[in-house]
Image (tube, rainbow, N blue to C red):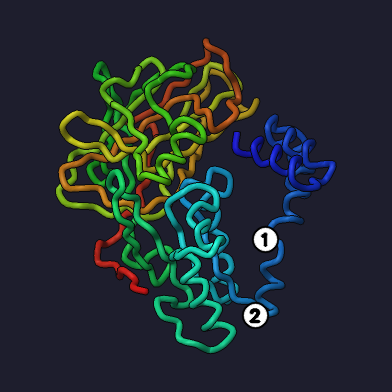
Amino acid sequence: MWANLLLLAGKATGRIPPELDEMWSNLATATNVAQTVAWADARSPEHYLAELARRDVPLFLSNNFEDRLFMPDAALEYRQAAHNLGIRTYMMLNQGIHAQAEAAGAIGLTNVVFDRLQQWLDAQLKGGAAGAIAEGTVDFELRPRGLFAKSERLTFGSWPPQSGSSVRYFLSGRGRGHSGALRPVSEGAPDEGADTIKFGELSGLSAGVPVVSVTLQTLFRAPILASLPLVRTTYAAVYLTEPLPAETLVCGTPNATFSATPSGPSFQLVGYLYDVEPLLQTGTLISHGGNDVWRDAVPGEAQLVQMRLRSLCVRVSKGHRVGFGVDMFTEMLTPASTDGGLSVAINVGSNGSFLELPLVSSNVEAPQL
């Protein structure tokens, strides 16, 4: 949807290249993949990293967590590739959608991104004081805890953080219950099994109403919520950790690996990560992602599906749970198949479906301007 909006805006206000519609059609239908990748590669900033390193060009990077086209995990990978080449970098990751966090500064209003940018330019071009700016650092704005909540930022001196660790959880089957569990791998593998879900557009899990939800989230800190006990188990599966014994900082890029057995050759899996409060088990969406399998699956045979969820930085309160939901439809992505008879068995337990969460020590510096 966001790509279509950009195409419409480009046609209305600019002069887009004539082949752009063809390339977007290739992406939407997974055709002419090699041609499309080659076309995009020549226009990617990654294509010019070696030249930037040769010229010793410093990079100031700003990206937003809810940018649903230019995702934060891709920006972090770009920053890391530049850093590995010796390029001087400073990166900010902010709450908000495409360019929202920077918009006020673009029209001359007080804005933290533009304040940091001015410090960066002063330090790099004039030899001035860097202030809160330190080369090589990554500055995260944490997800707000509620409506109109104040902003909180953390700075990491390296990426991935030296104080961080990735904790892997088995997906443990729901059996005859409503929810399954997330079991730390350190506790050993639960019994193997499978949770089967069908294609359906109203599972109870969602990344929000397109445009509307992320706008409310950005302007008013309004969370995207799901009542996990009301999730329709025909179309979705939910897995929960035990209540957390202490406040936990989840910061980085979560990953999921599914052993999935589809009934057809094409299918989509969508993952949703939630901060789940203990009373009503209402989940606040903190990350999501999806993966399509286009014509590559053998019906009835298990295959691995890798899913990278969008990067995040959030404090999960003591007593809350982390919830992970899976269904087969999101309005954010074009599904590989919309067959109402399509089903996918998520092979759980020792069969090999996992969730990896990036956890960070809470002893992280809060930058000051």
Q: Which residue is mark 2?
A: 56
Counting from the top left corner in percent of width and height, residue 228 is at: 29, 26
Q: Alpha-carbon neighbours of circle 1 within 10 Å: few (<14), some, or many (≥20)?
A: few
Residue at (45% x, 49% y) in the render: 96
Residue at (31% x, 37% y) in the render: 284
- Residue 54 left/right relative to 261: right
Q: Residue furthest bottom?
A: 127
Residue at (41% x, 39% y) in the render: 216
- Which of pointers 2 and 1 lies earlier in the amino acid sequence? 1
- Residue 297 left/right relative to 347: right
Q: Nearer the viewer, residue 301 or 356?
A: 356
Q: Alpha-carbon neighbours of circle 2 within 10 Å: few (<14), some, or many (≥20)?
A: few
Q: Nearer the viewer, residue 71 or 358?
A: 71
What residue type is disc 2 on? Asp
Q: In the rendered image, which quarter is residue 334 located in?
A: top right
Residue 271 in view in this figure? yes
Q: Which residue is mark 1?
A: 45
Seen in the picture, residue 42 relative to 192 is either above or below; the reply is below
What residue type is disc 1 on? Pro
Counting from the top left corner in percent of width and height, residue 27 is at: 69, 36
Q: Nearer the viewer, residue 141 or 175?
A: 141
Counting from the top left corner in percent of width and height, residue 236 is at: 39, 22
The quarter of the image holding the C terminus is bottom left
Residue 189 in view in this figure? no
- Residue 31 left/right relative to 321: right
Q: Secondary structure at mark 1?
A: helix
Q: In the rendered image, which quarter is residue 258 located in?
A: top left
- On residue 88, the disc is none
- Residue 33 left/right relative to 209: right
